[in-house]
Amino acid sequence: MISKVGVIIIVTIASVTLSTCSQQDGSSLLRLALQTEPTTLDPAHSVDFSSGMISSLIHSNLVRFNPEGRIVSDLAGRWEISENGTMYTFHLLPAVFSNGRKVTASDVTYSFRRLLDPATVSPRWWVLKDLGGAERFHSGGIWDERAVGTLDDSTVVLHLREPAAHFLSLLAMPPAGIVCREEISRQGKEYGRFPCGSGPWKLDLWSEGDELLLTRNPFYRGKQPAIEGISYRIIPESMTRIAEFEVGNLDILEVPRAELERWRSAGAPLSQREELRVVYIGLNNARSPFHDPVVRRALNLAVDVEAIIAHVLFGAGRRARGIVPPGLRGTPVPDDLYPYDPDGARELLAKAGYPEGFKMEIWQRENPEGGRILESVQGYLARVGIHVDIVTREWGAFKQAVDQGTPDAFYLDWFADYPDAENFLVPLFHSSNRGGGGNRAGYESEVVDSLLEAGTFCRDESKRWEFFRAAEERIYRDAPWIFLWFPIRYEVVSHRLQGYRIPLIFNGQRFLDVTF
């Protein structure tokens, strides 16, 4: 039965999405919605999506991501990297915090030392772990003055313990934002509610549970935004967000998967972008029978991933042939090793000694969509003799069990912290990251470890990709997961909004080029 709300959506969607409500036309604010409220706007403690995204609008970094995920200038107008890849010299552009005070090189030193200081208790201190002595300092040791040095008020020198080709990407993450030290001193633990940065926006209002309002930072050194401000309303319910967009109270709407067909049929101008995210079912590589790669390959052949994408995700995904999302690839996608082939799956199971199949559990966190997906997987595996019990736990209990290696298998995803293949391959498959470090499947390969280490240290991009390609192809062949898909994000924007692009990485859009 269709509710009255559903009927209204069906009837009005074409007229509202393709025109703009008059109450919106008169607004000089960009009107957006957040599903979850930020926990803080302190860069050192911004770990969730909302916090990191808004913190990046308020605080400048040495470098930042543009909407295409490329590293561009922010506070640093230019930089040099030493021949051995361990010394970075950044030359700062003139910049001013939103309180009117000039940004100097010492602010960078202060911000980085604060992030690493164990007293700060930052969950994201690891962003700067490649600095010389960083791990020792974070463990309570002495600060290495050479790790972050200054030559003058506008020159910062960073010394790394060893080369890290992705280091600039780490510096563009929200935790590496440069904070105003006197405001930290004044606000103390409340800084996250009253942030002070040198980015294009400043926090004007935070009405808890309702709205955050950003306005232009009048001291921003770069191109001033064309719009006057950004209103972020906290709207957890997807149907409420849809209704608010339809009546002209929102400018950008992420379209839920279940609503895609409705919007497509109405002719709405949908924009799309593949997310830097991979969805998978991790297999416990340390437990029988999943320690056998033949069994793991059989499970991949048994599941019709394309059908699940079409019928459960409504087409909002691309089947994962490998680990690295297509938007980050420097080489072609690996050959398809696991087309849907139930007969082939039965042959491999028989070869591995399981002609009658076996029983297993797949764990998931509480998630209605995840339940529908796993029910489909359950049905496909049953066709080749594998009986699956689906176990659902709340997030904390689920994460603890997975990190400890309790389940046979688990349904999970991985979001990029920064747009680099290293961020998918090393955390998820290097043996040093087994368990809570990201390698929750417990995959181990000395060959893969060495390839990943070589790719991490190599600064030649083409050679770096040769190492990563070789590692990914070997991992894909070893099948530590049931490889599922890379999700696709769909958005619709009001026709009054111009110049907006869906960013590749969540903090890659600063709204400097959007106009009404």
Image (cartoon, rainbow, N blue to C red):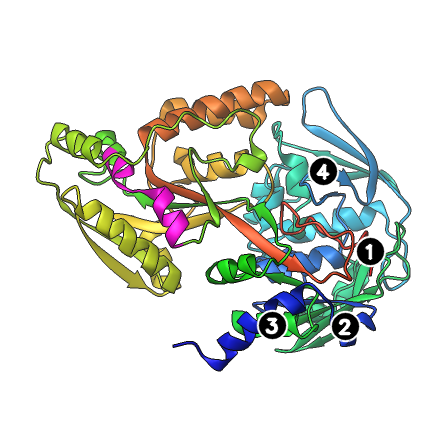
**Which three-letter amino acid code belongs to the residue tagged 1?**
Ser
Contact between labelled residues 1 and 3, with CB atoms less than 8 Å apart = no
Element type at marker 4?
Answer: strand
Mark 4 or mark 1, which has the lower sequence index? 4
Disc 2 marks which residue? 24
Judge left or right: residue 505 versus residue 158. Answer: left
Name the chief secondary structure element in magenta: helix
Element type at marker 3?
Answer: helix
Mark 3 or mark 1, which has the lower sequence index? 3
Q: CA distance from mark 4 to mark 3?
A: 41 Å
Element type at marker 2?
Answer: helix
Q: Is residue 497 above or below residue 487?
A: below
Q: Which mark is residue 12?
A: 3
Q: Is residue 303 magenta?
A: yes
Mark 4 or mark 2, which has the lower sequence index? 2
**Which three-letter amino acid code belongs to the residue tagged 3?**
Thr
Disc 4 marks which residue? 71
Q: CA distance from mark 2 to mark 3?
A: 17 Å
Contact between labelled residues 1 and 4, with CB atoms less than 8 Å apart = no
Q: CA distance from mark 3 to mark 1?
A: 42 Å
Q: Is residue 257 visible?
A: yes
Element type at marker 1?
Answer: loop
Magenta-highlighted residues: 298-312
